[in-house]
Amino acid sequence: LESPLSLEKVSERSGYSKWHLQRMFKKETGHSLGQYIRSRKLTEIAQKLKQSNEPILYLAERYGFESQQTLTRTFKNYFDVPPHKYRITNVPGESRYLHPLNN
């Protein structure tokens, strides 16, 4: 999740066409592949915000966001609170965590 992950790369590695991969993934999980990847990244960032003092800018870069502002906007849309407030408060966010899929 820390490296750039595109639908093209995933479909190439899976051996399925992009269209077929997206359709199968949505059918099995209820999420689009893009939504799933974004939600997993945000979940990992949220956990790191609570467990470390890594700067938000570093997390944005590490997880492939274009800027800290892009991460902040995306994080706030998902967790209803910006990353800096999430880190310093006891905002319950675990209910929004998206855990890895099991094989």
Image (cartoon, helix red, strand yellow):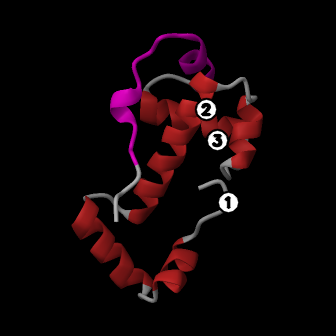
Task: Report the side of 40 relative to 70 (left or right).
Answer: left
- Residue beneath disc 2: 48
Amino acid on which disc 3 is placed: Thr
- Span of residues in magenta: 83-99
Q: Is residue 86 above or below residue 1?
A: above
Taking the magenta stretch, the answer to whether it contains residue 70 is no
Q: Position of residue 52 (x, y in %)?
A: 67, 25
Amino acid on which disc 2 is placed: Lys
Q: CA distance from mark 1 to mark 3?
A: 17 Å
- Residue beneath disc 1: 3
- Residue 36 sits in which quadrant? bottom left
Q: Nearer the viewer, mark 1 or mark 3?
A: 1
Whichever of callouts 2 and 1 sits on the residue coming sooner in the sequence is 1
Task: Report the side of 59 relative to 76 (left or right).
Answer: right
Quadrant location, the N terminus = bottom right
Taking the magenta stretch, the answer to whether it contains residue 95 is yes
- Residue beneath disc 3: 70
